[in-house]
């Protein structure tokens, strides 16, 4: 699987050959470096661990882990399953141009924006209660939740007010519009999870062919 870590820079628009404006999210993707190689013989599966965004200081065990790969400490690590493990080496640098080209589809994973405590209308798209005929200040309230003598409890997963956002989210099948290998930029059509500056994982789409 092709995958790379990146930092969300924000949104803009670019124009295609037909002068159509395409909304894109710009991601500074990589470069990442291989910090660990896992093989079937030793770990039971083939995968590589890649590091992104250099870090000034880490603790002793982490420093040893990076020193073994011969690279500077990094802030973010992710493990990526691969088919041909023999094509990778410790300390190898992987850029966005090595993995993606314009026209491909990608899945982007990140942590969504946190929106704090939200009511049921904002969180679950409830329509609210009536605004006339004696309804008194309950217009945005959730109403009855069905917890009477039977079943005498509230079922898990009941849609109620609570914390909204700040969850690991994946947006699938996004179009890669442009790849700027020189500046390590990836331009993806549409919105991806998280605020500006958020770290996201870009993978080749697993459902690109339906």
Image (spheres, rainbow, N blue to C red):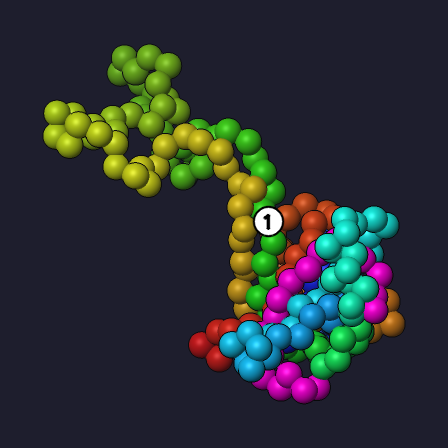
- Is residue 35 or residue 5 the one in the foreground? 35
Left or right placement of residue 148 versus residue 57 in this view:
left
The percent position of residue 68, horizontal first and vertical second, equals 78, 68
Question: Would residue 174 be visible to someone looking at this image?
Answer: no
> Looking at the rendering, which quadrant does residue 92 occupy?
bottom right
The magenta region covers 70-87
Left or right placement of residue 181 versus residue 24 in this view:
right
Residue under the image location 76 percent in, 75 percent down:
90
Question: Would residue 113 be visible to someone looking at this image?
Answer: yes
User: Which quadrant would the N terminus be assigned to in this image?
Assistant: bottom right
Residue under the image location 48 percent in, 74 percent down:
207
| Disc 1 packing (10 Å; few <14; some 14–19; many ≥20) | some
The percent position of residue 2, horizontal first and vertical second, equals 63, 75
Residue under the image location 56 percent in, 42 percent down:
166
**In this view, 117 is above or below 202:** above
**In this view, 205 is above or below 25:** below
Q: Is residue 86 magenta?
A: yes
Residue under the image location 60 percent in, 62 percent down:
108
Left or right placement of residue 194 versus residue 141 in this view:
right
> Looking at the rendering, which quadrant does residue 95 occupy?
bottom right
Instruction: Give the residue number, with chain letter if any, for mark 1.
Output: 111
**In this view, 89 is above or below 59:** below
């Amino acid at each position: 699987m092709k995958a790379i870590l990146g930092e969300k820079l924000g949104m803009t628009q670019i124009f295609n050959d037909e002068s159509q404006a395409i909304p894109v999210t710009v991601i500074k993707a990589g470069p990442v470096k291989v910090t660990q190689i896992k093989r079937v013989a030793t770990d039971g599966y083939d995968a590589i661990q890649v590091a992104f965004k250099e870090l000034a200081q880490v603790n002793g065990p982490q420093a040893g882990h990076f020193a073994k790969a011969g690279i500077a400490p990094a802030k973010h690590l992710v493990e990526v399953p691969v088919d041909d493990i023999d094509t990778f080496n410790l300390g190898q640098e992987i850029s966005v141009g090595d993995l993606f080209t314009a026209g491909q589809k990608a899945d982007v994973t990140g942590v969504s924006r946190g929106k704090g405590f939200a009511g049921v209308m904002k969180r679950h798209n409830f329509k609210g209660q009536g605004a006339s005929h004696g309804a008194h200040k309950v217009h945005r309230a959730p109403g009855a939740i069905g917890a009477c003598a039977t079943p005498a409890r509230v079922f898990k997963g009941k849609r109620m007010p609570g914390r909204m956002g700040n969850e690991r989210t994946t947006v699938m099948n996004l179009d890669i519009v442009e790849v700027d290998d020189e500046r390590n930029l990836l331009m993806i059509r549409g919105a991806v999870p998280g605020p500006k500056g958020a770290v996201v994982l870009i993978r080749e789409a697993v459902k690109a062919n339906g």
